[in-house]
Image (cartoon, coloured by chain):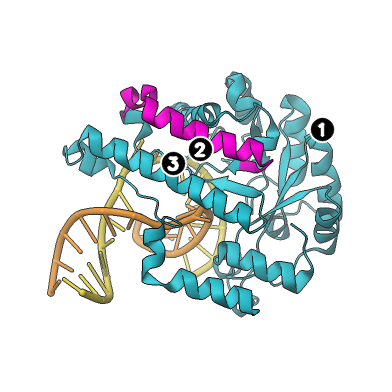
Chain colours: A cyan, B yellow, C orange
DNA sequence: CCAAGTCAAGGTGCC
DNA sequence: GGCACCTTGACTTGG
């Protein structure tokens, strides 16, 4: 590892690193909330802390030459239960500060709502809740001031296997501030790129190609073919691809072991690196060492940011 | 104080 | 049928 990575890693290990607000997002728990353990003011302070924290991370990575950032889904915990805070100027102005910074610095912000978003569920209540979670993400993007397009995407998975029809119906019900930002990512089990392409043909949702997932669920096509197909679904917007690796110690391991993300980048499909370096696609890294993994990949693979 | 357990939420498939 | 996994963990509880 290079000196720069060593230094950053050392910095991350320092106890006072957390206090600098770099990785200091706070969470709230529903059962604690229901037991009235949190005052309104406390929740507001958590929201403010998290917004400021996301902005400080944005400023930091910008100074390090990184322009792409996945904003935390946890930025406003217990969003559903705090309607009145959504009109609070202290919250709204801070969200807008993020937008001003992102847009003036030409950064790209995305989000990845968690696994509970299943628009293709057999259970209608699950779909309703999924839409609620998406509305929350879109609300945050709206208040930040991000335009309604896939450059600032809200990325989810297809959900329940074989339920493309339900997925399409749910997507058609979405409000435009969600739908115009939505992307669908191929996964290891339920929806591969070919299946997502069929959904794209119906409802025009771009495909976010994950090279690691494609290894598990390729539908019989090569990564190069999958990349060609997914790129064409993005129109004028620069496509986003995901990169993660199996940890080398688990190369011959069980499915679960192989699926786990490694700490650092060990390999990148050649075409993915080439197209990234030509500025044709973006790569979002999903590695345990996060931005440190990125700096190391820049050195190891001559990756351009 | 530290380690382990828990957390609102779904779906999957290995074991 | 239980469990881990997905996720840029954080907090609470038990010892």
Q: Secondary structure at mark 2?
A: loop
Q: Tag 1, which chain?
A: A
Mark 1 or mark 2, which is nearer the start of the sequence?
2
Please state if A17 lies on the left or on the right of B2 as rendered.
Answer: right
Number of marks in picture: 3
Badge 1 density bin: few <14, some 14–19, many ≥20, Cα 10 Å: few
**Which quadrant of the view contains residue B4?**
bottom left
Is the residue at mark 3 from the same chain as the one at mark 2?
yes
Is A89 situated left or right of A255 in this image? left
Figure check: A208 above or below A129: below
Pointer 3: what residue? Answer: A51
The verdict on residue A19 being magenta is: no
Q: Position of residue A113 (x, y in %)?
A: 52, 41
In the drawing, what numbered circle is on residue A117?
A: 2
Image height of A45 relative to A53, above or below = above
Secondary structure of the residue carrying tag 1 is loop
């Amino acid at each position: 590892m290079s000196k720069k990575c060593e230094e950053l890693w050392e910095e991350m290990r320092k106890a006072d690193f957390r206090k600098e607000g770099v990785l200091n997002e706070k969470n709230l728990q529903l059962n604690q909330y229901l037991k009235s353990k949190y005052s309104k003011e406390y929740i507001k302070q958590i929201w403010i802390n998290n917004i400021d924290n996301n902005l400080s991370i944005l400023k930091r990575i910008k100074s390090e030459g990184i322009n792409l950032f996945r904003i935390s889904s946890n930025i406003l915990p217990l969003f559903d239960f705090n309607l009145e805070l959504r009109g609070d100027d202290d919250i709204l102005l801070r969200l807008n500060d993020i937008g001003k910074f992102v847009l003036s610095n030409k950064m790209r912000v995305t989000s990845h709502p968690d696994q509970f978003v299943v628009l293709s569920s057999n259970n209608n209540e699950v779909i309703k809740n999924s839409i609620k979670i998406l509305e929350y993400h879109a609300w945050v993007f709206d208040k930040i001031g991000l335009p309604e397009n896939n450059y600032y995407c809200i990325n989810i998975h297809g959900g329940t296997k074989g339920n493309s029809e339900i997925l399409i119906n749910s997507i058609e019900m979405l409000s435009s501030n969600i739908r115009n930002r939505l992307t669908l990512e191929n996964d290891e089990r339920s929806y591969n790129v070919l299946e997502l392409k069929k959904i794209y043909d119906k409802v025009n949702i771009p495909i976010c190609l994950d090279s690691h997932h494609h290894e598990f669920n390729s539908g019989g096509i090569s990564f190069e073919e999958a990349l060609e197909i997914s790129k064409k679904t993005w129109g004028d917007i620069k496509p986003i691809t995901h990169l993660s690796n199996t940890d080398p110690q688990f190369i011959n391991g069980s499915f679960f072991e192989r699926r786990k993300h490694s700490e650092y980048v060990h390999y990148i499909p050649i075409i993915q690196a080439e197209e990234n370096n030509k500025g044709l696609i973006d790569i979002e890294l999903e590695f345990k060492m996060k931005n440190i993994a990125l700096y190391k990949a820049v050195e190891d693979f001559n990756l351009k940011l």
